[in-house]
Structure formats: structure tokens, C-alpha cells
Amino acid sequence: MSTRTSDSVIALFCGAGGMSLGFSQAGLGPKIAADIDNDACSTYAKNMGGKVFNVDLSEQGSRFNNELADYKNAFALIGGPPCQGFSSAGVKNCNDKRNRLIFNYFSIVESVRPRWFLFENVEGLLTANGGRGVADLVGEFIRIGYRTRLEKVNFAAYGLPQARKRVILVGNRLGTDFELPAEKCSFNAGKHRCCGILPPAPTLDEAIAGLGSPMTGPDDAATYATSEPATEYDRLMRVGNSAGRVKLHFSSVSPRLAPLISALRSGETMRDLPEEYWHNSFRRRAFRRVADGTPSENRGGAPSGIKRLVGNLNALTITSAATREFIHPHENRPLTLREAARLQSFPDIYEFMGRAMSIARQIGNAFPPMAARIYAEHLMRLDGAFGGNRALREDMNPGALIGYHLTDSSGMSPALASTEARLESLRTEQLPLFEPFTQGAL
């Protein structure tokens, strides 16, 4: 294995660089990255450096594909293919061509053969197409010799100030079993909560504290409300910002929305308001109910419209619509782009390129850097414990599904039960190679 590739990281579907930033903070900044979004690539280049390619990863023969040949046997390949086709925030469609990108990710892993891979997607991936998609993907990784673990996690458990459920698939070809990073925090975002003896994740108020009043225009820079950080999370977000000024912290409210926003109390959504405030598209869908088994083209669920967040809870999941739909817990305005970026754990010095809608999409689609750093440090510890730099014998390292975790609920929907059955069939076809590795062995 060359010294060039032994510790290299490759970032696919890198977006604005959230996952790459976390790996960089752990000392594993990606050497090469790629994404189809031009603005996201500009953001990545502005903040991360390294080589970033603005390409469609479903196409063969690009300059990026040619460069990948220099990174065989890299330390890790990381990324999260576009997830809109699976997301509960939109219509689920198993035929969406973006969904096929998960197998483009796999094909690059098969070609590069990294020691580790880290794959992330929305929880809708678990039940899409009856669970066949995710089971087929896991099966392919097993076929080429990766021992994999599939889990649904909530990044609030790692200290993120928002409830953000995602599917994580991690694998290695060292021939060894492992666990994902241990949870560090309890959390409570209202609907999503996990309360226990662990210290609580920062609340929304704690996360956006210190930013001060927003400006009115996108080109204006805001000044921190206080010279010293107001909370520990505020201190973390200010690191490196010696100027004490913040971009993208601006807000304006249209006359049409102002009375509606003012009527919202803490935790309320548009449905809690008199119908005179409902817009037509909300009115058409307000009482829709979607049951398991509903055809994907008819999914989407009932909307909640705008909603006022609760300051002493963790935030709801930040999406590309957060700066339009999420109302500040105490002020009559939506969240600013910078507040959304903070809730995703991007530091205040991180610069985003493009217009406001593009930036909102980049922030909402990002993997939180805070969680990425935890995963990067965990993979480094595992790799060192198992002698990752040793020569790899493909024939001695059979692939396997070493474990999965699909839900924290006591019950399971029929759709998720179907996925579990498919995953369990993968496990019964294989024999364990080693005893599971636990963090206590480190």
C-alpha cells in the first residue's frame, strides 16, 4: 500500500463539506471530493481545500473517476448519496433516478477498495421498495468482503442540538467486527426524545445564543451580542472567528406572513391556527393520513406548514426549508441561515457560496460536522486497534452483516418488519468470524 493512499480519505457526494469538515477536524481531511452541485463545490473549495470535482457520479469516464485510480486501498471512502427520493419531507419514489446513486457509491467502493467506508442516508431508505434496496446494498458490500453494520441513529445523541435521524452503514475489509460510536447525550425535541442518565444535548436556545439580532440584508455582517460566548456551544461555534462578525445572519418577514407568525405560540404549527391563516396548498393536505403500504407516488403525509420551535428543547430536523418554515422560538421571524448552520454544527467562520435558497439546501442536506468528527475518531481508533496498515488478504476476510438496529420503538411497522426479515436472511446465511468488538476493549 502506497504512503499516498494509506491514510487518504475520499469524499463522494460531498455537498457543502459537513462530513469532510468533521473528518478534517479529526486529522483526516479528504484528499479528493466530488459533488454534482456547483454551489456546494464552491462552498467546499472555499472552506476545505483539496481537490473537489463538480461531476455527476453516475457518469463513467470523468476526470474524477480517472483520479480515483491513484487512491486504491485508501483509509476511508465517505459520503451520503442524494436522499430526496427516500425522504419523508417529500414524495417517496423508489424509481427516482437519484435513488440509484446509492449503487454508484457501492461501485466506487468496489473499485477503490478502501479499508473503511461510511455511508449515510435518510431513514426512508430502510423501508423504500419493501426494504429490498437497502438489503441489496448491504448484500453487495458483503459479497465484496466488507463486514458491515447498519443502524438508524439520532445525531442528537452525539451532542447535536437538533433531533436528526439518519441511517448509517459502516464497513471494513479488515475482517473484524465492531460497533458504532457510543451515545454521549440524552435529548428531547418533543416528538423525538431519549432521556436518561447521559448529559443533555444543547438546546436550541443554547445553540444560537450569542449571535445577536439579525441584519436585514444578505450582504450585512452581524456582530455578536456579547464579547464573551454565552454558552459552551456558542464558544464552540465562535472558534477561529477573531473578527467577531457573522455572515448569513439576516431575516425579513413579508407583510402576508407577519400576522400568521405572530399568532403562533411556542410549539404550535399552522394547523393550530384558525383556518383563515391556512394557505390553499396546506388546506388541501391538512388532514391527509398515510398508512404503511401506501404506494410511494401517493406518499408525503399531512404537512405542518410553519412551526414555532421551542427554545428549551432540541431543534427539529434542519432541512432545506428550515429558514422558511421554522420560526424562532422567541422572535417573530424564521430562523436565519446562520442559525440553521449552527444547529448543523457548522462553525460561524464557515462560508457558504450561492444564493439564499442554494445555501439553505446545502445546510439542510449536510452531514453535521460534529457527528462526522466523532465517527472519524472512532474509525481511527478501530483501525489502529486492528492493525489497519497490515497487508490485506481478501480471501481471509469474508464479508458479513455483523449487526443492525432499525428502531428504538417497542413496536415495528409492517414495512420495517419486511426490511428486518430481509436483513435477517443475510445474517443467517453467514457464520460469525470473530466476537463483536466493543469500545471497552480500546
Image (tube, helix red, strand yellow):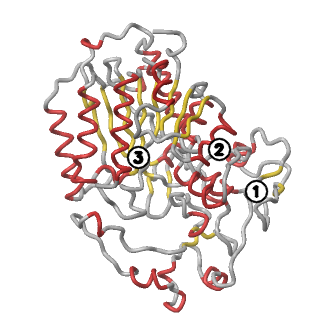
Residue 119 on image: x %, y %: 41, 37
Q: What numbered label is drawn on residue 211?
A: 1
- To which residue does mark 3 refer? 121
| Disc 1 crowd, CA 10 A, few/some/many (<14, 14-19, 20+) | many
- Residue lying at the far bottom in this picture: please name it: 276
- To which residue does mark 2 refer? 43
Count of numbered labels shown in the rendering: 3
Q: Is residue 343 above or below residue 389?
A: below
For marks 2 and 3 on the same chain, the one whose residue lies earlier in the sequence:
2
- Could one spot residue 111 in this view of the protein? yes
Foreground mark, 3 or 1? 3
Foreground mark, 1 or 2? 2
- Residue ID at (49%, 82%): 272
* Element type where label 2 sits in the image: helix
Mark 2 and 3 residues: CB-CB less than 8 Å, in contact?
no
* Element type where label 3 sits in the image: strand
Quarter holding the N terminus is top left
- Residue ID at (14%, 33%): 428
* Element type where label 1 sits in the image: loop
In which quadrant of the rendered view does residue 253 lie? bottom right
Whether residue 256 sits left or right of residue 99 in the image: it is: right
Q: What residue type is labelled 3?
A: Asn
Mark 3 and 1 residues: CB-CB less than 8 Å, in contact?
no
- What's the distance in space between the residues labelled 3 and 1, CA to CA? 31 Å
In terms of depth relative to the viewer, which is nearer, 141 or 342?
A: 141
Q: Which amino acid does label 1 sit on?
A: Leu
- What's the distance in space between the residues labelled 1 and 2, CA to CA? 22 Å
- What's the distance in space between the residues labelled 2 and 3, CA to CA? 21 Å
Foreground mark, 2 or 3? 2
Quarter holding the C terminus is top left
